Amino acid sequence: MQDLIEIRRAAKRNVLTTAIIGGLGLLLSSQLLIWLPKSAYLIGILLTSLSLVTLLVAYFKYREPLHSFVLSRKTLYYQHKNGTWQLEWNNIQRMAVPRISQGLEQKELAMIGIKLKSYQPFLGAISPRLMTNILMEQRPLLLYGLGLDQQLNCKSGACYGNGLLEDDHFKDSDGKIYTGIQAMLANRMQKLRQQLGFDIFIAATELDRDEHDFVQLLQQCQQQVLLDGSLES
């Protein structure tokens, strides 16, 4: 294993191209608004709106760190515009591409899942802003976890109310008590573990390769680190 392996964020690609397209679109729309007759203003307004959205997408792409993951001999380190987290290799129990059941079929999600041995190191090394962001982004996963049949039987959406909210009190297996946003994230992780089998979920847009290839890379790194550790001891 190399000393450091950096994983480039797929969503970071084409930032400059996206910004140029948005800028050119905005320039063109401003000219159209000047020269087009009033009866055709709608075309210029529509193009202006699309250009502004494109520039906004480029801005959010730009704000993200270039690399989503840094794999070292000690940790799996994740970087996000809202903060970071890290995991030691010996705290990872399982890594795979999550699957959900749809009738008789199994569907893979466009992400990877990580199951932890202990929540304590993870919760102690993640920023409050990133915890809040994870809670918001994971809401669709809760609906996946409920299962297709239950989703179809919940036309009003009211039955999801309690399932989307997390308790702000959590006690881990070692007896440590968490409150506030840490407890909410821990409860969410536990809920998703029961429903989907994993605690942490990483979208495919965070990766520079296929989800299965990334899982294989992580497994190889973990095996090599654990092997090196056993040889040293």
Image (cartoon, rainbow, N blue to C red):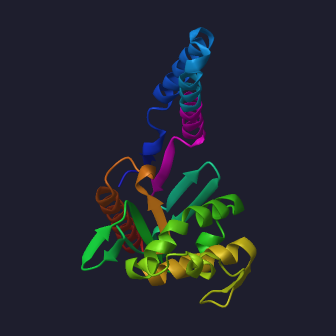
Left or right: where 213 falls relative to 179: left
Residue 223 lies, in percent from the top left, at 34, 68
Residue 90 lies, in percent from the top left, at 46, 73
Q: Quadrant of the N terminus?
A: bottom left
Region rendered in magenta: 51-72
Q: Nearer the viewer, residue 4 or 206?
A: 206
Q: Quadrant of the C terminus?
A: bottom left
The answer to if 46 sits in the magenta stretch is: no
Left or right: where 35 falls relative to 16: right
Q: Residue at x 33, y 49 (%)?
A: 209
Q: Nearer the viewer, residue 143 or 172?
A: 143
Q: Nearer the viewer, residue 167 or 80?
A: 167
Q: Residue at x 43, y 50 (%)?
A: 205
Q: Residue at x 55, y 37 (%)?
A: 57
Q: Nearer the viewer, residue 130 or 162?
A: 162
In the displayed orientation, state which residue is furthest to the right: 180
Q: Residue at x 32, y 77 (%)?
A: 101
Left or right: where 199 falls relative to 204: right
